[in-house]
Amino acid sequence: MIRLEDIKQVFNPRTINENIVLRGVNLRINAGDFITVIGSNGAGKTTMFNVLSGAIIPTSGKILVGDRDITKVPEHKRAKMIGRIYQNPLLGTAGNMSLEENMVLCSKKGFRGLKISLNNELRGNFAEELKTLGMGLENRLKDRVGLLSGGQRQALTLLTTVLSRPELLLLDEHTAALDPGNAEAVMTLTRRFVEEYHITAMMVTHNMQQAINYGNRLIMLDKGRIILDISGKEKSELTVSALVAKFKAIGSTMQNNDEALLEQ
């Protein structure tokens, strides 16, 4: 279980450019959750992921994994614990290295000074793992990753990240830069891997239908706050129009509350 407790993130504090991005976020991520995350631009989605991954240290609040406080643990030390896949498929792999070399690097993610030598047994294991993608990559172990398509690279990143068995997988709009066919293929793999490997995952998406169709839980951010957290039957019965209506209703209520506080 992972918890965010009263997380606040302020950029350029006490200056004319002060920007409050997260306003006391509280979130409990249960083992096995697949949480879809939606919200308008600037709602705080990517900043929340940056805080979880250790890319930034929050201004205040705590991040707990079980009973362990990891709030100030740097990103490279969280890499084995928290995996992240970005929107840009070029960011998850080294294009000038071969598939097998990339897979070796991912095998030692989160560790420093650990040497893993390529051998026929390891290559055979990599080939079997790549075969699960259904893209023929098991026959291209020595090819440079830079020769792959965006969809193939993102699928490779997804596979290697999942195989590292992270306690939490962050999917940061990981299909947004792909064409519809590749996006659908990567989403199919995402669902399959999350279910087969029992991965705890969070996925940011701007596609409301996708947010409804995937995962067991949906949260919505607005102006740095979680304004909606639904699961179970309520989520399964959602429609896009109902979700938009909820956003408008809750957002309006919160705006009125904020205005009332300012007037006090």
Image (cartoon, rainbow, N blue to C red):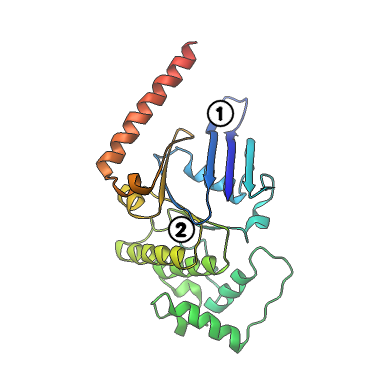
Residue 17 screen position, x and y as percent: 56, 28
Is residue 260 shown above or below 163?
above
What amino acid type should be assigned to the residue bearing mark 2? Asn
What amino acid type should be assigned to the residue bearing mark 1? Asn
State which quadrant residue 8 falls in.
top right
State which quadrant residue 254 falls in.
top left
Residue 17, numbered circle: 1
Label 2 crowd (10 A; few <14 / some 14-19 / many >=20): some
The residue to which callout 2 is attached is 88
The residue at the point 50 percent across, 10 percent down is 264
Residue 143 shows in the view: no
Residue 256 screen position, x and y as percent: 39, 20
Is residue 156 shown above or below 179?
below
Q: Earlier in the sequence, mark 2 or mark 1?
A: 1
The residue at the point 47 percent across, 53 percent down is 33
Residue situated in front as seen by the camera: 181 or 37: 37
Q: What secondary structure is marked by label 2? A: loop
